[in-house]
């Protein structure tokens, strides 16, 4: 088998592997992270995703905070890491009178 065939076969296998490696290594966008956690809120509570908003976080190791609060002033604060992973969830309850 000529060396050109071997090099061609290696390149043919390496190009899709390189593409997938680059694609999988990219972080999620802010929109993707907010949408994911708003959907998680909707699935957990049955409330609409429009209860959610996001802010940049001032906490260490936290990228953004997705805050979802319903009309009864209860909800969740999802702390999202730099790669889109959930760092923590803070349950929020209505203040007691």
Image (cartoon, grey):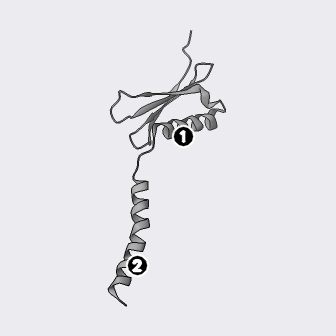
Query: Which of disc 1 and disc 2 is earlier in sequence?
Result: 2
Mark linked to residue 94: none
Relative to 90, residue 85 above or below:
below
Question: Which one is in front, 23 or 2?
Answer: 2
Taking the image as shown, residue 38 lies to the left or right of residue 89, namely: right
26, above or below 19, in the image: above
User: Which residue does the numbered mark 1 point to in the structure image?
Assistant: 36
Quarter of the image with the N terminus in it: bottom left
3 relative to 22, above or below: below
- Within the image, what quadrant is residue 45 found in? top right
Q: Residues at badges 2 and 1 in contact (C-beta under 8 Å)? A: no
Q: Which residue is mark 2?
A: 9
Foreground tag (2 vs 1): 2
Query: Between residues 87 and 55, which one lies in front from this camera angle?
Result: 55
Dot 1 alpha-carbon crowd within 10 angstroms: few under 14, some 14 to 19, many 20 or more: some
The residue that appears at 33% across and 85% down in the rendered structure is: 3
| Residue 95 spot, x, y in % from top left | 54, 14
Q: Which percent across, then down, holds residue 18?
A: 39, 63
Q: CA distance from mark 2 to mark 1?
A: 39 Å
Q: Residue at x 39, y 28 (%)?
A: 57
Q: Position of residue 72 (x, y in %)?
A: 62, 19
Crowding around mark 2 (Cα neighbors within 10 Å: few <14, some 14 to 19, many 20+) is few
For the residue pair 81 and 76, the one nearer the viewer reads as: 81
Q: Quadrant of the C terminus?
A: top right
Identity of the residue drawn at 58% across and 19% down: 73
User: Element type at marker 2?
Assistant: helix
Residue 6, x across and y down, in percent: 36, 82
């Amino acid at each position: 088998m000529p060396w050109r065939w071997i090099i061609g076969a290696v390149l043919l296998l390496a190009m899709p592997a390189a593409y997938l490696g680059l694609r999988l290594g990219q972080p999620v966008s802010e929109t993707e992270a907010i949408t994911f956690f708003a959907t998680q809120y909707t699935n957990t509570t049955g409330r609409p995703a429009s209860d959610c908003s996001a802010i940049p976080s001032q906490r260490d190791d936290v990228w953004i905070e997705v805050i979802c609060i319903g009309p009864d002033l209860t909800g969740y604060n999802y702390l999202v890491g730099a790669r889109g992973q959930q760092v923590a969830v803070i349950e929020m309850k209505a203040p007691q009178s």
